[in-house]
Every structure is written in structure tokens, then in C-alpha cells.
Amino acid sequence: MESTMNTTVQALAPQFAAFLAAGFGAGLAVLGGAYGIGKLAAAAMEGSARQPTAAGDIRTSMIIAAALIEGVTLFAIVVCVLLAIKA
């Protein structure tokens, strides 16, 4: 009975490792994206406070940069999901 259980665990170990790695990768991608957008928003708020006349240009640049960060984060999550499905 125990040898059958060990064989099952050994057979599932690569899949478990792939799912665990995909989960960690997706989590790190989301954390990195959130940190980047947070830093971006903080810098934009500081810039708008220092130069109120340039607030519109700063906001436009911030939205474009945030969209690019979100795009890279989404791409990383899709890659993690594809790697998990392939395993």
C-alpha cells in the first residue's frame, strides 16, 4: 500500500512543482506591477503638487505608463498560466 502511495506522489511531483512555480510567478508579477504603479502614482502626485500647471501632462504620462505596466503584468500572468496548463 505504501509503495503505491510513493509511486503516486512521485508521479504527481512534477505537476505539483509546475503549479507551485506558476503560482509564485503570478504572485510576484502582480506584486511587482502593483509596486510599480504605486511608485508611479506617488511620483505623479508629487509632480502635480510641485507644478500644478503641468498636472494634465503628468496625468497623461502616468496613465500611459500605468497601462504599459499592467500590460507587462498581464503578459507575465498569462505565461504563468500557460506553463501551469502545459505541465
Image: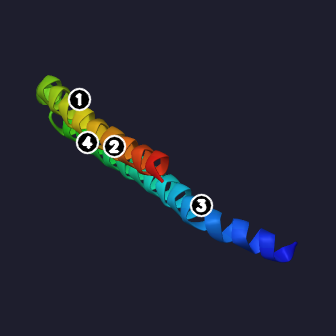
User: Quadrant of the rendered structure where residue 11 is?
Assistant: bottom right
Q: Which of the two labelled residues, at mark 2 and mark 1, occupies the earlier sequence position? A: 1
Q: Which of the two labelled residues, at mark 4 and mark 3, occupies the earlier sequence position? A: 3
| Residue at the image position 38 percent from the left and 50 percent from the top | 35
Specify the color scheme.
rainbow
| Amino acid bearing label 4 | Glu
Residue ID for mark 4 = 46
Residue ID for mark 1 = 63
| Amino acid bearing label 3 | Phe
Q: CA distance from mark 2 to mark 1?
A: 15 Å
Residue ID for mark 2 = 73
Looking at the picture, how far across and down is residue 57, in whole percent? 12, 27
Q: Nearer the viewer, mark 2 or mark 3?
A: 3
Q: Which of the two labelled residues, at mark 2 and mark 3, occupies the earlier sequence position? A: 3
Which element is circle 1 on? helix
| Residue at the image position 31 percent from the left and 41 percent from the top | 75
| Amino acid bearing label 1 | Ile
User: Quadrant of the rendered structure where residue 48 is?
Assistant: top left
Looking at the picture, how far across and down is residue 78, in whole percent? 38, 41
| Amino acid bearing label 2 | Thr
Report the side of 28 relative to 40 (left or right): right
Marker disc for residue 78: none
Q: CA distance from mark 3 to mark 1?
A: 38 Å
Q: Nearer the viewer, mark 1 or mark 4?
A: 1
Q: Residue furthest bottom?
A: 3
Q: Nearer the viewer, mark 2 or mark 1?
A: 2
Looking at the picture, how far across and down is residue 79, in whole percent? 36, 46
| Residue at the image position 20 percent from the left and 40 percent from the top | 47
